[in-house]
Image (cartoon, grey):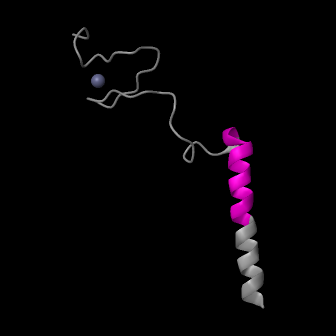
Amino acid sequence: MLFKIIFVFLLLMVLVALVGRVLFPSALPRVLRKRKGAPRCADCGRYLIGRTTCDCKGGGK
Ligand SMILES: [Zn+2]
């Protein structure tokens, strides 16, 4: 009996999480979100904020 209650509780938690993710994607922590902004350089891994090219690939020196 107790196992059933725990199982239903877990099921509800999953359901709430799924619905919450669909309704409020911005409320999730940054770790769970898909990375959209802040593109990174494929070579050095630096963030390319406010620019499209990196310093490591020509033009920097
Ligand atoms: Zn780079």
Q: Residue at x 62, y 45 (%)?
A: 29
Q: Is residue 33 above or below residue 54?
A: below
Q: Quadrant of residue 43?
A: top left
Q: Is residue 35 above or below residue 7?
A: above
The answer to which of 47 and 10 lies nearer the viewer is 10
Q: Is residue 53 left or right of residue 24?
A: left
Q: Is residue 13 left or right of residue 34?
A: right
The answer to which of 51 and 34 lies nearer the viewer is 34
Q: Position of residue 45 (x, y in %)?
A: 32, 32
The quarter in which the N terminus is drawn is bottom right
Q: Is residue 28 left or right of residue 49?
A: right
- Give ligand 1's quarter of the image: top left
Q: Residue at x 38, y 28 (%)?
A: 40
Q: Quadrant of residue 11?
A: bottom right
Magenta range is 13-26
Look at the image and say whether residue 52 sits in the magenta stretch: no
